[in-house]
Image: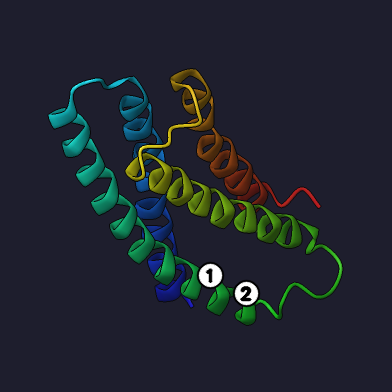
Amino acid sequence: MLWIKSLHIVFIASWFAGLFYLPRILVNLAQETDTAATTRLLLMARKLYRFTTMLALPAIVFGAWLWLGYGIGKGPGNGWLHAKLFLVILVIGYHHACGSLLKKFENGVNTRSHVWLRWFNEVPVLLLLAIVILVVVKPF
């Protein structure tokens, strides 16, 4: 199980690296007026989103493997695991939201300001912080 846990941590860290950077590219897209720069940023965002998605899949698979190894969180003292799983669902939703925003930029429909996107960019930091606290501290 330690090998699975190690791989899970590596893929989670890699997935979050993409989730930290992709919205930053979207902030730049919201501010960009030059067509050539916009094209370059869209290419970067598309490639990063695709790569980040490929990193998310093994992170989720290894996490499910660990979850099954823990007995699916049954019994007392596993409230932290249920809370973590809820936050993981939010991370998956955030990943999907990044893809939706990227599609809108690709279609030339920017509905969000760069300020909103800057705040949106902070969400994965808060999610990761909460998840790590739940896993390490196991408060309930």
- 10 Å neighbourhood of mark 2: few (<14), some, or many (≥20)? some
Q: Nearer the viewer, residue 30 or 96?
A: 30
Check the image and report above or below for 49 versus 111: below
Check disc 1 and give the amino acid type: Gly
- For label 1, the SS is helix
Q: Residue at x 34, y 65 (%)?
A: 54
Location of residue 75 in the rendering, given as x and y in whole percent from the top left corner? 85, 73
- For label 2, the SS is helix
Q: Which residue is mark 2?
A: 67
Q: Residue lying farthest left?
A: 36
Total tally of numbered discs in the picture: 2
Q: Residue at x 47, y 49 (%)?
A: 100
Q: Nearer the viewer, residue 135 or 52?
A: 52
Location of residue 30 in the rendering, given as x and y in whole percent from the top left corner? 37, 25
Check the image and report above or below for 25 versus 13: above
* Badge number at residue 128: none
Quarter residue 129 falls in: top right
Check the image and report above or below for 77 versus 42: below
Quarter residue 72 falls in: bottom right
Q: Residue at x 13, y 31 (%)?
A: 36
Marks 1 & 2, CB-CB < 8 Å contact:
yes
Q: Which residue is mark 1?
A: 63
Check disc 2 and give the amino acid type: Trp
